[in-house]
Image (cartoon, rainbow, N blue to C red):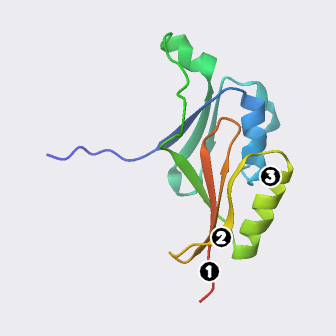
C-alpha cells in the first residue's frame, strides 16, 4: 500500500535570519520585513508549496544536539527566470552584492541558461531559463 504523502514544505535552517531573507528577497520572494527577527518564517509559494526558514537556535530548541552540517550540501533550490538574459543579470546583481557565485552563467547542454550561487548559509541556489529555439 502506498503512503498518501504530498510534498508541502521545503525547509531551510539558517545561521542569520535577516541575512538569509535578504538574499531570497533579491530573488523576488515577497517576504515581509518584520520576518527578519522571527525564529521561524513561512512563505506560501505558487502551486501550494511552502518555503520555510528556521534559525539554528529554533532547531536546537527541540534537538539540542543538532549541529550544522559541513561540506557540500546535497540540496539546492532552483529559480526559473523569464529569459536567458535575466539569468546573467540576476547572477551579476547577486555576486556584486557579495553573495558567492559558484558557477557563472553558461548555456547548459540540456537547453537552459544556467548559473549556480550559494545563499548565506552555503545552500546551492540555481538560476535558469530555457534557451531560445
Earlier-in-chain disc, 1 versus 2: 2
Total numbered labels placed on residues in the image:
3
At 52% from the left and 76% from the top, the residue drawn is 109
* Residue labelled with disc 3: 95
Percent position (x, y) of residue 30?
74, 48
Q: Classify 10 as above or below 55.
A: below
**Distance from the alpha carbon under mark 1 to that under mark 2:** 11 Å
Q: Secondary structure at mark 3?
A: helix
**Left or right: residue 73 compared with residue 32:** left
Report if residue 83 is visible in the image: no
Q: Secondary structure at mark 1?
A: loop
**Left or right: residue 5 compared with residue 70:** left
Q: Is the Cβ of the residue at disc 3 closer than 8 Å to that at disc 1? A: no
Q: Which mark is on residue 77? A: none
User: Which residue extends farthest left?
Assistant: 1
Report if residue 105 is visible in the image: yes
* Residue labelled with disc 1: 131
* Residue labelled with disc 2: 106
The quarter of the picture where residue 3 lies is: top left
At 67% from the left and 23% from the top, the residue drawn is 39
Quadrant of image for the C terminus: bottom right
Q: Residues within 10 Å of mark 2 (few under 14, many from 20)?
A: some
Percent position (x, y) of residue 18?
77, 31
The quarter of the picture where residue 90 lies is: bottom right
Percent position (x, y) of residue 95?
80, 52
Amino acid at each position: 500500500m502506498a503512503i498518501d504523502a504530498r510534498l508541502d514544505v521545503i525547509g531551510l535552517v539558517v545561521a542569520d535570519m535577516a541575512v538569509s531573507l535578504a538574499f531570497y528577497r533579491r530573488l523576488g520572494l515577497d517576504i515581509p520585513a518584520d520576518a527578519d527577527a522571527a525564529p521561524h518564517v513561512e512563505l506560501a509559494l505558487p502551486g501550494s508549496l511552502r518555503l520555510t526558514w528556521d534559525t539554528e537556535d529554533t532547531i536546537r530548541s527541540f534537538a539540542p544536539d543538532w549541529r550544522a552540517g559541513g561540506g557540500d550540501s546535497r540540496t539546492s533550490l532552483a529559480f526559473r527566470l523569464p529569459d536567458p538574459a535575466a539569468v546573467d543579470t540576476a547572477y551579476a546583481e547577486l555576486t556584486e552584492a557579495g553573495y558567492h557565485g559558484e558557477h557563472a552563467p553558461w548555456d547548459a547542454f540540456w537547453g537552459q541558461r544556467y548559473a549556480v550561487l550559494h545563499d548565506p548559509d552555503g545552500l546551492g541556489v540555481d538560476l535558469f531559463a530555457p534557451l531560445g529555439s
